[in-house]
Image (cartoon, rainbow, N blue to C red):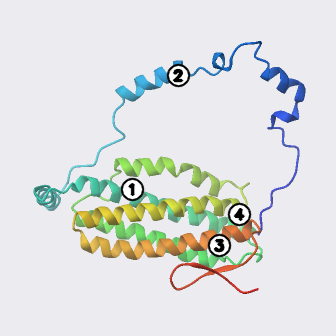
Amino acid sequence: MTQTEQLGMNRTGIQMSPLDSRAMQDVGGAGPDAFFDDSGIANLRNDYIVNADLLGSVPLPATLKGVAKAGVAALKGDSPHILLDKLGERLAFERTGARLYDALITKCEAMLDGTLSMSIDDLQEIRDDEARHFLTVARAIEALGGDATSQTPSADLVGVESMGLVQVLNDPRTTIAQSLHALLTAELADQAGWESLIALAEEQEQYDMVGEFTVALDEERGHLLMVQSWYEEAIGIPGVREIDDDNELEELPP
């Protein structure tokens, strides 16, 4: 299923109405600052920014085990609440990732026609990886005495960030190629998120987490390369590529 955009009567451009466009650009001798002065709305926003509450808070440990772990970490100079916040972020993002792949699988069941090397089984395998990563992070939160069902500030943040991606995948008008573009955006962010989380866990000497998260990162790198390959194939970039054993794209001979 290659890109299926078509030429048509698109009325969004200013050139569709030359007379009206000239009138819109006639500022009557006034400088552009008279029409593009946003100082009023900026002042209003500044007032909201200064007086706004925080996005949320990291919940206090709800168990004696959690309190003890937090106390030990604090004595060592660590910031366990920051690690819990970023764990919450990854938890929310992996949950969304599974839903994104669910949406693409549904779309492919209706639209996939065999012209792409991607298969529904490929997508299901990645979707299952995302769900497994979600459970890995949930166990890590509980190992620290945290509550995996609570929403931390960073979890709230990535939930809002991901809303557009969810809308793209669930929009019946978007093509498989457009859906893959949204997934490519998600996979790029996912890889960066795992890298930051691993660095933070290593800094706080959570070496069991580092090991499990490194496995997840390697799998996410594979996801990214596959989605990139499928997207390029879908928009007609010549040359079919495959993923080698080192999670790198390589050109196949013609």
Q: Are marks 4 and 2 in contact (CB under 8 Å)?
A: no
Residue type, mark 2 in image = Ile
Q: Which mark is residue 41?
A: 2
Q: Are marks 2 and 3 in contact (CB under 8 Å)?
A: no
- In the rendered image, residue 115, in percent from the top left (x then y), is placed at 77, 76
Alpha-carbon span between mark 4 and mark 2:
38 Å
Q: Comparing marks 1 and 3, which lies closer to the viewer?
A: 3
- Residue to which mark 4 is pinned: 177
> Along the polypeptide, which appears first: circle 1 or circle 3?
1
Please tell me which residue is depicted at 89% across the width and 29% down the height of the picture.
18
- Residue to which mark 1 is pinned: 89
Q: Comparing marks 2 and 1, which lies closer to the viewer?
A: 2
> Along the polypeptide, which appears first: circle 2 or circle 1?
2
Residue that protrudes farthest toward the top in the picture:
29
Report helix, strand or loop for mark 3: helix
Q: Which mark is residue 229?
A: 3
Q: For this rendering, which residue is in front, 254 or 56?
A: 254
Report helix, strand or loop for mark 2: helix
Seen in the picture, residue 19 relative to 159 is either above or below; the reply is above
Please tell me which residue is depicted at 15% across the width and 56% down the height of the picture.
77
Alpha-carbon span between mark 2 and mark 1:
31 Å
